[in-house]
Amino acid sequence: MLADVGNVAAAGIKAVTDDEGVRMDERLAALAEAHGVATWYENFQRRRTEVAPDSVIGVLGLLGVDAGTPDAVGAALAATRDRDHGDRLPGTVVLREGQGRPLPAPAEITLEDGTVRTVAGLPADLPLGWHRLATGDQEVTLVVVPAGLPEAPESWGWMVQLYTLHSAQSWGIGDLGDLRSFVERSAGAGMVVLNPLHAITPVPPVPASPYSPSSRRFANPVYLRISDIPLFAAAPPAVREQIERLRPAASGLIDYTAVWAAKLAALELLWPLAGPVDLDADPGLTDFARFCALAEEHGPDWQKWPEQLRHPDAPAVRAYRSDRILFHVWVQGLVAEQLDTAREAASGMAVGIVHDLAVGIDPAGADGWLLQDVLAAGVRAGAPPDAFNQLGQDWGLAAWRPDRLVASGYAAYRDMLRRIFRHAGGLRVDHVAGLWRLWWVPPGMGPAEGTYVRYDPEAMLGILALEAHRAGAVVIGEDLGTVLPEMTATLERMNMLGSSVLWFTRDWDTGEFRPAAGYRRNALASISTHDLPTAAGFLAGEQVEVRAELGQLAGTVEQEWATWRADRAALLELLESEGVLENREADPAEIVLAMHEFLARTPCRLVAASLHDVLLERRQPNLPGTFDEYPNWRIPLAAPLPELTGDPLFLRVAAILNTRREERETR
């Protein structure tokens, strides 16, 4: 990665060009290190890659550190030395349960329950939880976190893209009623792993991707089942008839905007029948509802609102009054009720419903507005170049500012986790490596011109463990791709599960698929993910065919087909060697069964089967790197819900995985 040496020189920062590219001034490197900004990283080929000085300067600027001139670098370094060498505590002190720590002076601790203790140092017997620590003229957050979580149970379940379900009762998209029905007919499964159900900005157009939400703290009302709202049953017949006429016409692809327009109109008809709404019961929810009301009036992007409305604490915002605030609080209450009903249906499962935490949020959305004081203004999170994305990835997502999280006691992060865990038996954390470091792309630069910014994993994972522990929930980290060894080791130590995907679980020195016995114990095993080929799609080469049509191949068509043929042959050889496949020429259904027999033989604590695989769907839910060229997140399953749960392959896969569970229980 080459820097623009001219720009660096213009800033007065010394840059030296050598055989490895551009190296930056030592003082700039020291400043970057002090603020957790990487000046080099190990790429997907495990090779050291230098970061351009311009990128480091840009990212430091996003952290509020001026590094544009030598004088500015010197001043920032001096400020950093003063910060690091004093006796002042950081805004948040994280203490692992059972471990003490010295303090620079006597202190007073106020525990969650109000108990006050005077201490000379942090004692090892402090209870788990969120406390306050006062010493001298400082008062900071003290959070005591568990060393790890209890072992996850031995179980299996279904991976469900909720929007793909459909039944006679749902309106053009899978809904929370479908989720409840599926849980009740899940053929002995111990969990249901969902796509993110995070909130949208409730104005058109409604985005299809669940991984670029408006808010991760609230839920998406597009998943409401209108007929399950108690007010619907109590409404006058004429109102019910009017609502039924709003049902969207069936179509080949899911139209989120049309579905939300129909459900919003139905909710508007029920709203006059609703009782009083308490705006003081949940101030955070009221703030979110205020954003929704303002978005309806001024548009979905708060950055384009009138200047006086661009901060949630602005006088004009606090003075804003609208019946629409009440309406959106009410709507979120309905979503929470239906989420609770689904969770109750799953109460007999070993794990229950596993929600998915997206890696970030749309900076133009509700959390971008409400949490702007703890976000890095202007940053775009993404990923560095790799074999499949040679220009890097710009996800367009906002990112936490690590220094602001510390200063604010991680309150926003804690609140987000607590709200999700209210309805979850488990949480899948997308791109779990982002709890250690995240790729930041500065404004005006391409995705390959970013760099990593470090977070405090002791805090990020510790707080996640604390809130999961309190909710009695399992945590699954999506740790695919380039993951540092310490990340895998920490997940293992804390009993947070990793992700072992059949397509990726290989010996990368030889390229060979790993045998079942070589899988990790603390992991969720699956054939694929929403971003990868389905089982039937892989067997047919669908991913090569579609990417070739769209011009998305990294190599030539011939090279990609050759790679696919080799991978397919290697997979079939693996299944034969494990004794789960007798005939390589078997039909796809038998090979898919063999794949699940293989997963059942792994030592992984959890195994997940995808509905796309048991229905032999060829099209994958999402094709990374595409937008309108491919119908990402809009493809419904071929079979309606009643047919799905009675499908012979669905039941045969369930039988394989139920046998696995029973055998493990008798050991």
Image (cartoon, rainbow, N blue to C red):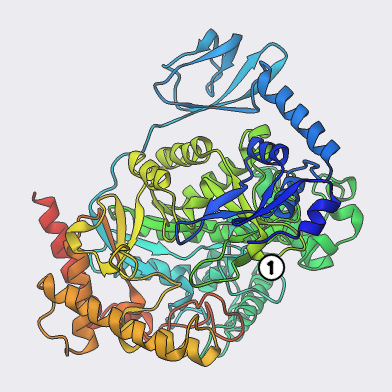
Q: Callout 1, which amino acid?
A: Pro
* Residue at image coords 46%, 79%: 169
Q: Nearer the viewer, residue 505 or 153?
A: 505
The reply, left or right, for residue 428 in relation to residue 331 is left
The one nearer the camera, 568 or 247, is 568
Between 122 and 87, the one lying in front of the other is 87
Q: Residues within 10 Å of mark 1 (few under 14, many from 20)?
A: many
Q: Identify the image quadrant of residue 7.
A: bottom right
Q: Nearer the viewer, residue 133 or 249?
A: 133
- The residue at 63%/75% (across/down) is 260
How far across and down, in percent of the image, does residue 618 sit? 38, 86
Q: Quadrant of residue 80?
A: top right
Where is the N terminus found, in terms of image quarters?
Answer: bottom right
Res. 251 in view: no
User: Residue at the spot x=54%, y=59% of the render?
Assistant: 358
Q: Is residue 551 above or below residue 457?
A: below
Does residue 90 sit above or below 67 in this rendering? Answer: above
Disc 1: which residue: 202
In the rendering, at what x and y percent does residue 577 appear? 12, 72
Position of 188 compared to 385: left or right? Answer: left
Q: Secondary structure at mark 1?
A: loop
- Check the image and name the residue furthest to the front: 19
Q: Quadrant of residue 411?
A: top right
Where is residue 356? Give x, y as percent: 47, 59
Q: Is residue 420 positioned above or below 244 on the image? A: above
Where 448 falls versus 489 (above or below)? Answer: below
Q: Is residue 356 visible?
A: yes
Residue 61 appears at what percent x and percent y? 77, 47
